[in-house]
Image (cartoon, helix red, strand yellow):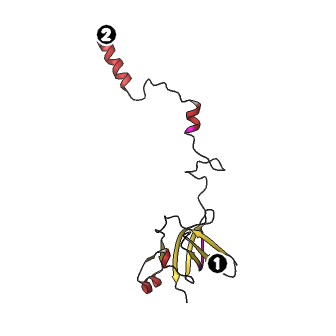
Amino acid sequence: MIFTRSKFLILLVVVTALPGFGQFTSTSPSDKTRNAPYLDDKGAPLDQPSTPLKIVKMKGVVENVDLDKRTITIYRGKKHGRSIELTFPQPNGLEQVKTSKKTSKILGKKRLALEDVEMGYKVRLQYYPLLNQVAELVVEKLGS
C-alpha cells in the first residue's frame, strides 16, 4: 500500500481523534495532593472505611427526649447502670421511630415522630456506639 500525502493526513487525523491516544499529559504534584482522598487512622479513604461500623443491639426505657437537640436518652437498666444519649442520622423533623405490631395496634400508627415518643416507653434499638447514632429504634411497650 502506497501512502500518498492525502492518505497520510487522513490517517493522522483519525489517530489523533482516538480518545486517549497520543496524549502525554502529566499531573503536577499540586494536582496529586489536591485530589488525594482524606484518610482515616488506618490509611483507608474516609468514604470507604477500613472496617464496618459496629452495631450494638439493646433494650431499654426512654428516659428523656430532647426536642431542641433532637436526641433521645435511653436507660439501659440496673445491670448496666447508666444511660446513653443518642442522636438520629436523619435530618431534623424526619427522625423515624418504628412501633412493634402490638404497639401499632394500640396507637394505630406504624411510625412515630420524635415528638410523639414519651418518657417510660420500653424500646428495642440498634445503634452505632462510635457515632452515638441510632440505627433503628422500635417502641415495644407504652409506659405504664
Could you tell me which residue is drawn at 58 percent across and 50 percent down? 46
Residues 128 and 63: in front is 63
Residue 102 pos. (x, y %) = 46, 85
Q: Report how far apart the C-alphas of labels 1 and 2 lie in the structure.
A: 85 Å
Quarter of the image holding residue 110? bottom left
Label 1 Cα crowd, 10 Å radius (few <14 / some 14-19 / many 20+): some
| Magenta run includes residue 27 | no
Q: Which residue is mark 1?
A: 76
Image coords of residue 78 (percent x, y) = 69, 82
Is residue 130 depicted above or below 49 in this figure? below
Q: Is residue 21 left or right of residue 137?
A: left
Placement of 76 over or under 131, stated as above or below: below
In this picture, is 100 found above or below 10? below
Left of 48 or right of it: where is 15?
left
| Structural crowding at the residue carrying mark 2, measured as other residues with C-alpha within 10 Å and reported as few (<14), some (14–19) or many (≥20) | few
Residue sitting at x 57%, y 44%: 37
Residue 5: give its label.
2
Q: Which residues are magenta?
A: 34-63
Inspect the image, locate mark 1, and give the three-letter code of the amino acid beneath it: Arg
Whether the residues at callouts 1 and 2 have beta carbons within 8 Å, the answer is no
Quadrant where the N terminus sits is: top left
Q: How many marks?
A: 2
Q: Quadrant of the C terminus?
A: bottom right
Judge depth for marks 1 and 2 and give the one in front: 1
Dominant SS in magenta: loop
Q: In x, y percent, where is residue 90?
A: 49, 65
Q: Does label 1 or label 2 sit earlier along the sequence?
A: 2
